[in-house]
Amino acid sequence: MSFTAPVLNYAQLAPMLIVLGGALIGVLIEAFAPRASRHSSQLFITVAALVSSFAALMQVRTQSSANAAMGSVAFDGAGVLLQASILVIALLSVFLIADQENFTALPAAVPGSHEERESLQLDLRVTEVYPLTLFAVAGMLLFPVSTDLITLFVALEVLSLPLYLMAGLSRRRRLMSQEAALKYFLLGAFSSAFFLFGAAYLYGYSGSITFAGIQSSVVGGSGNDVFLLLGIAFISVGLLFKVGAVPFHAWSPDVYQGAPTAITGFMAAATKIAAFGAILRIFYVSFANAQWQWSPALVLIAIITMVFGSVVAIAQPDVKRMLAYSSIAHAGFLLAGVIALSKSGLDATIFYLFAYGIATVGAFGVVTLVRDSSGEVTDLNRWSGLGKRSPLVASVFSFFLLAFAGIPLTSGFIGKFSIFSSAYESGSTWILISGVLSSAIAAFFYIRVIVLMFFKDPVEDGTSVVIPSALTTITISVAAVITLILGIFPSPLIDFIASTAFFIR
């Protein structure tokens, strides 16, 4: 029995390997470094790993290959763009995570116990969040470039497991945070089981676990179509769970509300990019020739997701839950790019993912600044008159809300215009109509928050806006500037995406 040594293109795998290496170094720091030096060391290693990974990605961005890891990973234009977006958003998120005020002192302690009180008195810092973030980023980088079902599943678990843990690290409202983590874990486990079930059906249909092999079977029509439809359905459940599409959205509001706000922003932005990257690749490569079989169901899910997210967000009294339902609605908008199944749909989806991700991290960064003596204030009623207390912070948050609403001169307008245009070109009229109506509904609750902040009197209940740290200021400022630039002058990025984005088939 002979052994064949694997052939790996380490240059193309370098962005993922660097992030994994940084995560492993972070684990060693947790094991051996003195507690007093861990926070600064972990922050330095995390930022260095992300920056180095981005630099490595730029070095090899023009080297397309389907054999970066013996056919398991494809390095192409769309994959490079998605990985670059994940790294940029991860770096901005790490700056938010560096504000340790949001994290519990001792995650393993029972809420309200003597151990927790003692850890708070000692002002302990949770620094394990940094290697967990890097492990999650590594999985996210692998997810949109995976070209077989086993690698895709491994990437799914690598990105998910750290997020399950990080969702339970909130410093305040510990029981709510732990409930969010448990709910996210249990529902995530169910979605992973559906994914594996779908992979088994697709293997039974095609005799292959690679996207190219599945595509060949779809084109040749040699398999049992029932297996194909069941495989697509179950695989879609696993992937749509990650983007929070209806009816697989139940985890989103509770997890967004219970998790530390910095982690919520990271999840809402980076996970969506990675998951939609995987959805785009598998539908554009493997299932493209079976479009008429899956398109009607995906159109229905997209329409319900848009409308449901926009309508339910109106009734939310908590700013994080409101942004969660907003995220659900945006998942519906992004599905329009998948359904379009065209080059313009691919380009528009990548642009939308980056623009939405940047604005999301900035918006959650602002949420971390509104506090009272007990921590963050997320009750919208207590945001009344925020514009009179802190005009700058309220104005920046309003700007991000306008971007979510798709108002002109923001990146959100360009993103929605592009993705609805691709839907129209593909003949998805119902998607276009539903998207425009849902956007109009969404604009109502975004503007309602702006009116609440600027045209209502402040409530004297101890709510205030804290002075942000330097790193939090960088995150919010960079996010606001990018959102504005992409709204006023988006052509360079749009042209770059158009000339770069493609999938190796």
Image (cartoon, rainbow, N blue to C red):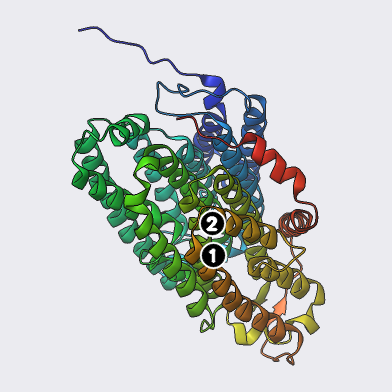
The kind of residue tagged 2 is Ala
**Whole-percent x and y of residue 27?**
49, 39
Image location of residue 82, percent across then percent down:
57, 42
Counting residues from the start of the chain, the first of labels 1 and 2 encountered is: 2
- Quadrant of the rendered structure where residue 204 is? top left
Residue at horizontal 66%, vertical 60%? 359
Left or right: residue 166 compared with residue 359 = left
Q: Residues within 10 Å of mark 2 (few under 14, many from 20)?
A: many
Q: Residue at x 37, y 30 (%)?
A: 212
Q: Quadrant of the C terminus?
A: top left
Q: Nearer the viewer, residue 469 or 497?
A: 497
Identify which residue is drawn at 47% across, 45% down. 280
Residue 194 versus residue 392 in the image, above or below: above
- Closest to the observer: 391 or 448? 448
Labels in figure, total: 2
- Residue 360 appearing in the image: yes
Nearest the eye: 115 or 368: 368
User: Measuring 35% from the left and 65% from the top, which residue is drawn there?
Assistant: 183
User: Is the C-beta separation of discs 1 and 2 under 8 Å?
Assistant: yes
The answer to whether residue 104 is visible is no
Q: Secondary structure at mark 1?
A: helix
Mark number, residue 386: none
User: According to the image, label 2 marks what residue?
Assistant: 423
- Compared across the picture, whether 214 is left or right of 337 comes to left
Per the model, the C-alpha gap separating discs 1 and 2 is 6 Å
**Secondary structure under badge 2?**
helix
- As displayed, is residue 241 above or below residue 116? above
Q: Amino acid at mark 1?
A: Leu
Foreground residue, 211 or 431? Answer: 431
Left or right: residue 253 compared with residue 76: left
Res. 432 mark = 1
Residue 32: x %, y % from top left? 51, 37
